[in-house]
Structures are given as C-alpha cells and as structure tokens.
Amino acid sequence: MSSHNQKEKEEEKEIIQPRVGMHRHFMMDGEKSKLEHPRSELWKWLFSYLGRYKWKFLTFLILLLIGTLVTSVSPIISANIIDHGIVAEDSYYIIIMSTFYFSLLLFMAITTYFAQYGMGKISQRITFEIRNDLFYKLQDMSLSYFDKRSSGDIMSITTNDVTQLNQLVGGQFVSIISSVVGLILTIFIMFFLNPYLALLSLIIFPVFFFFTYLFRKVAMGLFKESRKTIGNVTSSIQENIAGAKVVQAYGQEKKASTEFDEANTANYNAMLKIRKFMATIFPLISLVTTVITAGILLAGGFAVLGNVSVFGITVSVGVLSAFISILGQFFRPFMTLMQVQEMIVAALAASDRIYSLLDEKVEIPESKNPKLLENVIGEIRFDSVDFGYILENGEDTKSESPQIGSQAMSPSGLSGRPDLSDNPMMKQMMKRAMDFMKALPEPYSSFMINNIMLMPQNIRQKLFMSIMGQNPSEAPKLIDTILAEFNYAVPGTDNANNHPELQTSFKQADIKANQEESFPIPALPPEAILQMTKVIEKNLKSKATIQSSSSGMGEGGGMMGGGMPHMSPQSMLRMLATIKIKKEVYEQIPKIVREALDEEKKLIQHEQSKGYVLKNVNLDIPSGKTIAIVGETGAGKTTITKLISRFYDVNDGKVTLDNIDIREIDKKTLRNLIGLVPQDAFLFTGTVKENLLYAFDNPTPETEKKMIEVSKFLGLHNFIETLHKKYDTKLKENASNISIGQRQLIAFARALITDPKILILDEATSSVDPYTETLIQDALNKARKGRTTIIIAHRLSTIKNADQIIVLGSDKHGIVEQGDHESLLALNGKYKRLLEMQHRDIEINNQ
Amino acid sequence: MNSFQMIFKYWAKSKKNFIFQFIFLLLSTIFYTFTPIFIGRMIGSLVNANELLVNFLFVLGFAFLVYIFNRAARSRGAVVSSRAIYHLRTDISNAIYRQSFSFFDKTETGQLISRATSDIEETQMIFGMGLNLGIQSILQMIGVFVGFLLFSFELSIILLIAFVSSLTISYFIAKKLKPIFLETRESFGELTSTIRENIVGAEVVRMFSTQDKERQKFQKNNKRFYNASVDSVKFNSLYMPLVFVVIGFMTIIIFFLGGMWYIEGKMTLNVIITLISYIAALGFPLMMLGQIMLVYVQADAALTRVREILDSAPEIEDSPDAIPLKSAKGEIVFENVSFGYTSEHRILKDISFKIPEGKKLAILGTTGSGKSTIINLIPRFYEINDGAIKIDNIDIRNYFLKDLRSNIGLVSQETYLFNKSIADNIAYGKKDATHEEIVEAAKIAELHGFITSLPEGYNSIVGERGTRLSGGQKQRLSIARALIVKPKILVFDDSTSSVDVETEFKIQEALMKIMKGTTTIIITQRISTIRNADLILILDRGRVVGLGNHKELIESNVLYKQIFETLHHKQKSKGGVINE
C-alpha cells in the first residue's frame, strides 16, 4: 500500500505553476528558446557557486541518502520483529527491536531535518550571493546599459530569475540526485531479489520514455505559452498601476480593464490547457503503473502457482509481496525526472539571462593607471568629439532596444556607396560577411577570406549575391559554379583538380583596376537594376504603399538571411537607394519606383544622421569661467554634460580636464570634482537630510552645518523648516510628497554641498517659481566664483551673465554659434532668434 | 473575510464545476482505497489460478474507475482553479482603479505591483491542489481511523492522540511560519524597490560615485530577505521529520502492544500486519496535510497583502444620487475650500474664487504654495476637507466621476506615457479619434514635425516611461493628449517648463485660438500668459492673497506689483539689450 502512496505523492507535484516573471523578456523567451551561452558553460558557472559549499553540500546529500537507505531497510526490520519477536513470542526481542526501530526512525527524522534545512540554507545562500553579484555588477554598468534595457527586464533578472535558480539548487538538484541514486539502488535490489520479475519490470522503461517524450512535446509548448501570457498580464498590470492617475484622469478605467482582461483571459486559457493536459496525463500514468504492477503480480503469481522456473529462477510469495512496494519505489524516480525537466529548462533560461548580465562588459572601464588629480584647475576641452548614444565604440552598431530612433537599420546586401564604408552599418555588414565566410568549410573559407578583396568586383558581387544567406555547407557548390563562369576555381577542390585551365588565385593587378572604388561592389549592371525595379514596381502596385523599409526588414537576420534570390522588395528598394544609378538607367525606372526611391533616400539620410548627437565638436571651457549652452530640444545640450561626467565615452576625439584625457582619470576622482544637477531631480526614498548628504558616507556635524548653510543659501531652508519633521521628513518613492520645484532645489543643494570644482546645471530650476529662481540666480552668481560652471537653460535670463554662450543646432550635431551675449547678438543668427522669442513675450505685455 | 473563506469564495466562482470536482474526487478516492485490497488479495490467492485472474481483473477494473473519476475531477478542478485565479486578478485590477489619488500617494508602486503579480502567483498552489490533496488526505486518514476502530479500540484512541498532537504541532509550525512568510514577502518587496530605485536613479548614483553606499544598502536588504528565507526553511523542514516520528511512534506502539496482546492471545498476527500497513499508509496523508498547511500559510501571507488592496474602500466614489454631466458650461466656483493630504496638515486654507464660463485663470505662487493641489481638486482626485467646489453651480461631488473628469483636460507637471504608439497615446482619452484629429492635436502641441521625422511616424512606440523622448517632447505629447478630447475645462500645470522658448511660443499662439470658449486654468511663470488672463489668483502658503485681473492687481496688490516688476524687469533687461 505504501508504494501507491509514494507514487501519488510524486504525482501531486505537477500543479506547481511555472515560475513566472514580471516582464517582457519572458515573451521573447517564448519565441527564442535558444540560450546565449552553451549549457556546459552555464552549468559550470552554477557549480562555481555551489563549489564554495561543496563539503557542506556533500554532507547534507549523504544525510539525505542515509534517510533513503533507512527507508529501504525498514521493511526488513519489521519482518524480523514479526518473525522473531511476535511469532516467536519473544517479548524481550520485541522491546529491543521496537526501540531500535524507533531510534532508527528518530535518527532518520533528525538527519532529514538537518539535510533539508542545510540544503535549503545553501541554496538560499547561493541565491543571496548571485543577487549580490548582480547588484554589484549593475553598479559597475554605465548608463548606456540602462538606456538599452527596460527597468522591468533588469528587475526581472535580479528577482524572478534568481528565485527560479533557488528552486533549481534547493529543489530539483536534490530530487534529481536522489531519484537517480534511488533508481539504481532499486534496480539493484530488484535483480538481487528476482531477476525474472526484475526483467519484467523493465517494461516500464519504454513506457516512461514514451510519456516523457509526450510530456516534453506537449507540456513544453504549453508552459512557454503560459509564461508568455503571464508576461503580458504582468506588464499590463505594471503599466496600469504606474499610470493609474492618468487612467483615472481620462476616465479610461474601462479601457484599461478591457486590455487587462484580454491578457488575463489569454493566461487563463493557457493555464487551463496546462491543467487539462495534466488532468489527462497523470491519471493515465497512474492507471498504467497500476496495470503494470498487477501484470507483474499476475505473471509472478502464475509462476508461483505452476512452480515454473524461468532461466532456473523460481518466484516465492515473499518475494512477490516485496515487489509490490519495490515497484512503487521504482516508478517514483521516473515521475520526478519527467516533471523536473521543465523546471530545468526554465532554470537554465533564467541562468542564461543572469549569466549574460554578469558577463556584460563594463562600457566605461577604469583606466589601467587611473590618475588621481590634485590641485585641479578645472579647464575642460572637447577635442573633435563625435558621439551618438546608439553607436558603440569600435564595434558594429547593435541597436537592441526597439525604441524610437534606434530602429535596427537593415543594410541591404553588399552594395553601397564608397562613403558608406566607414559607416557603422557597413561595418556590420562586413562583419556579417566575414562571419559567413568563416563558417564556410575549408578550403573555401580561407580562400574566400584571403581573396575577397583581390577579386574583380563583378565576381565578388555575383558571389555574394548568390551565397549569402545560404546554408554554409551548400555554398561551396555555388562558389564553384560561379567561379567557373569567370574561369576561376578554389585550389585544392575537385573543380580545380579536374579543370587545370581554371585559375586558382587572383592577381594583384585586379585590385589596381578598381582601386578607385573601395569596398565592396561597384555599380550594379543596369539589367540587374531594372530587374529589381520590376519587382519593386509589382510590389508597389499590389500593395499600393510600400512599408517603411526599417519595419520591412525588422525580422532578425533579415539582412543576410535573404541573399539575393530571396531579397524582399523592401530591401531591394533600400539597396537601390544606397547605390549610384547612372542617369540613363534611372530614366528607365518607372515613376512610381523612382518616387519610392527618393523617399527611401531621404529616410536613409535621416537614419544615418540619427545616430550622431554630436559630430566634430570642439569646445574650450577655461577654468573658473561660466559657459551657457542653449539650443532646441534634442540638440545635445545634456549630452555634453554627460560626456564631461564620463557617463558615456566619446566615439571619437577626446574630452580633457586640465589637458588630461578624462578616460585616464580615476572615475571617482573625476566625478567628485563635478557637481551635476540633472534635469529630472531624482531623489531617493529616505529623509531630506539623507538626500542632501547623499554624497557623504559618514556625515559629520560639520557636513550637517554645511548642509544648513547651503540650504539657506538656496532659499531651501525656509521650506524645509515648514515640513513637519524638518530635515528628518521622510521623502516617499520618487519624492512624490513634495513639488517638482522643491525636488530641484534639493538636488541643487545636494550637488553644492560637495563643493565641486565644476558645477553643471542642466535645466536645474525649470520648475522653480520665478521668485525662488531670482534668489537662486543671486546665489549662483556667488557660487560661480572659483568654479568652472556650465549652465543649460531655456530661460535666456539665466544665460546672459555667462562668460561664453554656446548655441547648439540639432541639424548640425554641434555648435552653430559661440561667443558672449553681445557678440552673438551681433551675429544676428540663431541666438538672436531665440532671444527675440523671449523678447516677444514682453512686447505683448507692453502692447 | 479571512484567507480560508476567500479561497472558497473564488473556488465557488465556478459552482457547478466545483461541486462535480468534489463528487468525482470523493468517488476516485474511495475506489482508490479499494485497489490495494485486491492487489493484496492477488498475493493471498496464490493457490488458485482462477481466483488470481479474477482479482487481477478487479484490480484493472478499479484502476480504470479511479482513472475515469480522477480524470474527471482534475478536469473540473482545472477549470475551478484557473477561474479562481482569473477572477482574483480581475478583482484586484478593478480594485486598483477604484482607488483615489491619495491611495497611490501612500502606496509604493513597487509594492502595489508585487501584490498584483507575484503575490497572486503565490496562491496558484493552494487554488490548484488545495482541494484535491485536502480531500484525499482527510478521507484516507478517516479510512485508517475506521480501520483501527474495527480492530482495536485502545489502539484507535492512541492513533487519535497521535493525529491530534501532530496536527497541533503542524498548526503551531504554521502559525510560526505566517509572520515569517509575511516578512519574506515584505523584504522581497523592499529588495525590489531598492533595485528599481537604483535603475531609475542610476545617473545620480554614478554622479556621486556612491556605488559602494548603494551596495551596502542592497546587501542589507538582501541579507534581510535571506534571513527570512532561511527562517522559513528552518520551520518548514520540520514537517517531514515530524511525520516520520509520528509513524515511527505508532509502529512501535503496535508492535509493542500488539506483540504483547498476541502473546496473551488477544490479537491475531493478521490484524497486526494489517494495522502496520495502515500506519505505513498514513505517511502520505500526513505529509500532504503538512504540505497543504505550508501552501496555505504561504497563500495566506500573500492573500493578506492582496486583501489590503481589495478591502480598502475607495475614498472617492459616485454619490448614490449622482447626476450626469454631458457637456459642462464651464463655470467653476471654489467656496471656502480647505484641504490637506494628511488630516493634521492643511495645504489649502479657505480658498474662494469664481471663474466664469469660458474665462481664463492664472495661478501664481511660490514653490509649494499649493498651486498644483488646487488643480488636482477640480477633477476630484482628492476629496476636500471643507467647503465646496462647484461646476455649473452644482457641487462636483454630485456628478458622476466619469462625467466630471471627461469634461476636464488636465496637463500635469509630470507626464506619464503608455508604452504604446504615439498615436495611441495622443488618442488615449478618445476611443474613436480619427487620424486627422490626432494630427490636429499634435500640430497644436507643435509635435507634428517631430513625429513625422520619425521612421515610423505616428506608429512609433514611445517606450517605457516615454524614454527616448525628451522632457519637452513628453510634455507636448501630453498637451496633445488633453486637447484631443476637446474638454470644456482645460488645466495646465506648468506644462511647458521643459519646452524651449521658441516652441512654447508657438504652442501658446495655437492654444489661444482653440481656447476660446473653454474655461482655462494655467499655472505658469510667463508674464504674457499672466497678463492676458481674465483672472489672476495669487497663492501664498495655501491662502489666497490676491485675486483680480492684471489692471486691478497692479494697482491694489503690493505683492503682485512687486512680483510683476521683478519678472518684468528681469526679462526686459535681457531683451532690452537688443535695442542697444
């Protein structure tokens, strides 16, 4: 009877919900189950944490196994008590053995307790460490990391994924080990007891393989579906909670509920499917195991009845009854292993994401010999600085976030204007081409890599158009055919051996012939162009509108995935827009396509300029001076301040402080020199005082004195005094209990308290009322002394006193005007126009 | 309502299925307990081939019946539990929307989200397997007890004592665990908040190089969660050993007493063996009861937190005799209004003013004087403590909330955008907005040019919290969002503070045209706007210190004169240079 109970016990584990996360990446998880890292690497990484506790882990594991052993031994003891104690009427024996039995169980209870507690503790400890490591790593990350990812995704990794791992280490590891050990032990005992029945029992293997297969096939898909839908539920909840005030202000509760209901219903359906599947499969498994057990008993029973011997082995009644309980132990591990597999897949996916985060390279690395500056003068210089948020230093552009302005561009085959070759998009294309060549089998791989730049361009072009996107293993055939057309062959191949007339290397002379044209391919032959325009035309007519090309090729790998033969009309359009088309050819192109081409060209220009925020910016800020930066939204004002603080590294050129490249300066030293008051004054949950003294690890009475001094200086003190606990008033999440203007003042004071050498104010007082601002202006005039000050403001009244004013233009990606207030007015340019706007405000008043 | 009642309430959401699940479960458990009897008989019938075969067929028959009923019960259960979770989620989501702004001010977003998501996940187990396991284990325990009663009264009393004591111990463990589970949930919420804050405030952390400070803070939270988790492991690891001890105890009692009685001839060997196998069968139900207790306590902790949202009565609701407000004329009156976010601290004191239909009011005042608070009272985001606010001469508390709010277009200081397309965000308040209407609103807000420059134009996704848009662009988007509804009352809370002068000017001009006939309230720092307002309200520390138009105030109000001159002088002196 006990056998059945254990079976049932295992069976009940199925209802455990797949651990579901908070955010979107679970949705993506559904689509791409591929891990970024090889499994072996992930296991190695996991075991590196477990390794720290390996002796403890082994000890607890042994304790657990002892428990298992005692369970299997106990029937022997009770048999002994019955046979030698009760039946033999030996009360002394009964007392001794009962006491022994009880102490054995007590011992098992104690070992089990410590083993479970210990294992749980280890797994909690490991997840504690992983969480810590994750957080430590996050603190090393540069801001661009946070730009690229949604906070929900990062949070999901640091919370849910780690929780998932906890279940793996604390639960599944142990059950796998004990299942496998238990299985081996049981098989051993079965064969020891009766090989005939044991062999019969092995029928369970194919049956369970079938169930495991079925489970894997059906349940995995269902679980994925459920995770995907719960991801939608969660993000819907998150968004509507965060935006609850807007929902209410617009009276859109119903709309929000409907949206939520959609996600909720989808998850309901997914969960219902899982549970229905479980409702089918588990009773079925139960039935099958009972049938198998009964079948074995029947077969064994007939053997007993007929006293038949199979291979000379007879079956006894005692053995048969022992088999009932043993079969139960035998089925159990299969059930466990079947259910654990889903958890392991999920846990591996979780560790993959965790590992990726931990493995992420720090983009703003500390210099190898960081300089600790002393006696800083505070002279800042920008030297031909190029910068874009989506450009990556020295690497190809990878735009990961599907946000505005960073739409992955889809370069279209290996054609392009020469001036595109230093374009990041071109680099990416070349990298992909390189990767593709590397993937080819030898000798094709090295031949292509060595010769690609030597080939005449027509050959190169034809080669790439045919083979890109093909399976690397099939490409050689194509290469052979194409090369043969031009009377070439890859050395060492059948083609080269059988056709000695074919040339096997490209001469230097060939490059000379087309030196004026750089990588990769010259103009397409007119026929090809016209062929493509036909396809485009057909497509345009059928669809009436052509979708914007960036969305047209959004699918992963769209660029090379197509190759020429499978190129989409969108990518053809994109391709044609990037190459020069001879006039006579252009005229042959149908009007509808020509218009589309012009549109596309504009779009490309737009996209290309999109990446750069600053281009070739030179700027000199002398020590102790004040400069003001003006310009419209998006011109790069804030970017300049972020580059000085080295939140981002420049893509080209350099930023120096006292003539030292800031990349060589110790990051902490650099940032301690700078007092930045950012646009949106972010304050932490905590008291006003904690926020004001945020920069100090251990505030002293002096710093507190300084705090009050600065608060008075900025006119903040009076406001704080009105708060019910004054400086000890607790600020809520996002400081929602004080106004934005007050937040800005606190952020300003927070920066000023550190007495920075360089003061940067980025719209620091945009939400402060005009009277307080007047006060701040006066304070600022005092504070500026002895400091290099950079001010960004919309209100030109704030700017006028600056020693130098820089006017940024978003279309130029840099400085359009520079000088002091009067010289800029004299220029009669953008600055004056901006100023006149302000002036008009007053004119109206004087009407 | 406690968690136990709550679980039943949500199970009962699908009554028919729930009843059938219960019946099928009973049947399957009963047949299930019979199966081993026939397996035992198979061994007992090893003298007769026919009997062996008959018993074998019985086993198959019962196993099949168990399969049928178990499957039916589980299928019904699947619906019951999935529905329960579905309804719980719907209820909590609706409960959140019902809350007033002060609720959101009090509650941390992170905590709210974790209650609505991960806490509900914690209840999946109890909803899914609670009934199955509960019924099975209880039935089996009863079965064993009845079995004992048939054979020996004394032993069944001892068994009863064992049951009661083990359940009592389980109960105490569960009781001990509840605060621990609450602590794990709380500290986990805290942990989440810390991480969230460090992601949102990443720039500030880097600016002040306080990474180490934040690490220490995090480690403290992490440690707190770790300690709570280890505590919970410490107690919930007790269940299994407890079951071992109970079973071990009962086994030796049977061996000992049964052995003695056998020797005295009072009990047969068969009975002893049967009782022993009954005791062995107790392992499962006892273990499962412990498991259920654990799962229940876990769910209890989560549900307690969930109930805090479900049960918190919305402070602001439609009054029972609310009247509709189709299209307001737009007259707004404040009558001796007093208000404070907390009861002890009044932000606004005795505010009275009247804006006639279609007129424009500008509010002036220092940072923290209560300007935004006044504005938030009009759509009834907060309930005033004293006085009355009237629109079209009727107290706003008498209107349907939805009607009241749909008449007011509010552009607040902080902009929240949804992670949807730009078009969807603009059309947020107007379900049936046409593309032309969206473009029109965007044009007034000076956003059309920017939007069309995006590769995907109006279909561009705004991104989380509107990142990728500058502060000014976000503000302009929220202006467009308010305008598209064409409300009778428009409220701007310093909503162009991040917009550059040039753009702001254009917006003002465009607004001027459409604001005709619309009652408008503006908080601003711009002289032209202030001067052009029909009415100017000056606030100081929550009191009205000046009310009138520009002409009246400049003559009669010293404070206004002072403010105006400072502002004017400042701006004029800057602009004046042009003339030099």
Image (cartoon, coloured by chain):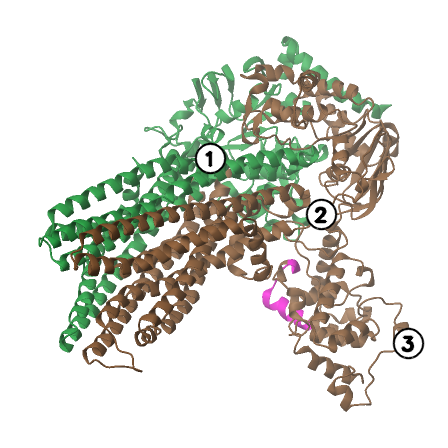
Chain colours: A brown, B green
Q: Tell which subunit mark 2 falls on.
A: A
Q: Position of residue B361 (x, y in %)?
A: 57, 22
Tell which tag, 2 or 1, sits nearer the viewer: 2
Dot 3 alpha-carbon crowd within 10 angstroms: few under 14, some 14 to 19, many 20 or more: few
What amino acid is at disc 2? Answer: Glu
Residue A363 marker = 2
Sequence-first disc among 2 and 3? 2
Q: Position of residue A314 (x, y in %)?
A: 26, 78
Residue, disc 3: A509
State yes or no: discs 2 and 1 in contact (Cβ < 8 Å). Answer: no
CA distance for labels 3 and 1: 77 Å
Report the span colored magenta: A534-550
Specify whether B536 is left or right of A396.
left
Q: Position of residue B394 (x, y in %)?
A: 41, 23
The answer to whether one can see residue B537 in this image is no
Q: Main secondary structure of the magenta part?
A: helix
> Is disc 2 in the same subunit as disc 1?
no
The answer to whether one can see residue A704 in this image is yes
Residue, disc 1: B406
Dot 2 alpha-carbon crowd within 10 angstroms: few under 14, some 14 to 19, many 20 or more: some
